[in-house]
Amino acid sequence: MKPIETIMRTAPVIPVLVIEEIDHAVPIAEALVAGGLRVLEVTLRTTCGLEAIAAMKQVDGAIVGAGTVTNPEQLHRAVEAGSEFIVSPGLTTDLGQAAIQSGVPFLPGVATAGDIMRGMDLGLEHFKFFPAETSGGLPALKALSGPFGGLKFCPTGGIRQETAPDWLAFDPVLCVGGSWLVGQKDFASGKIDGEAITARARDAAAIA
């Protein structure tokens, strides 16, 4: 498996995907990869999340991981489904230890200094800052980064195409998580609007 930092540096934006219909999984992955976004986070908020991960992994060039992982059991199921990395909304000692023992690249959610310290106690150096905007935005992350030099972050939550460059300009930020890449409007016609998703992905991939 690729180290978590390699995954984070693959593209400036990691699409955060809620797959409601398994038939949507592969077309969405193909459209995003075509636009230059290869790292895909499939949230486990729906009943077909694990199945979607397994399906999307078959798309050439895609690096597919599981998001919204909240406990060791979910983590193990996600790894069995083929997840190449794991993202969690928060960090518990049990989940962190399970991730480390499994060897899967892990990006746990943090929002406070205590969260970060808990992760550092486990030997972790890469974190998802979540929910980014409602946790104080970029000023909060800059303040949190001060005492913890060398850590790297992927802010997620409320970030948009227009605001992503500001986050990415901060050196400890390697990438951002984005839910704006795929929305309900892309399914309005009853099938996936792959061209629109690819165009959005291309714009996101071009962020410097």
Image (cartoon, rainbow, N blue to C red):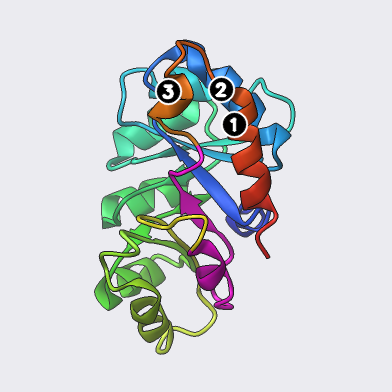
**Residue occupying the point 40% across, 89% down:** 147
State which quadrant residue 72 falls in.
top left
In the image, which residues are magenta?
163-181
Which residue lies at the image location 59% right of the left edge and 78% below the top edge?
171
Q: Residues within 10 Å of mark 2 (few under 14, many from 20)?
A: some
* Dot 2 and dot 1 residues touching (CB under 8 Å): yes
Q: Is residue 113 visible?
A: yes
Report x, y in % for residue 42. Answer: 45, 33
Which residue in the protein does label 3 denote? 50
For label 3, the crowd category at 10 Å Cα-Cα, with few meaning under 14, some 14 to 19 and many 20 or more, is many
In the picture of the structure, the residue carrying the numbered disc 2 is: 193
Instruction: Return the mark for residue 169.
Output: none
Residue 81 visible in the snapshot: no
Q: Residue at x 29, y 67 (%)?
A: 111
**What residue is at 48 percent from the left and 34 percent from the top?**
182
Taking the magenta stretch, the answer to whether it contains residue 169 is yes
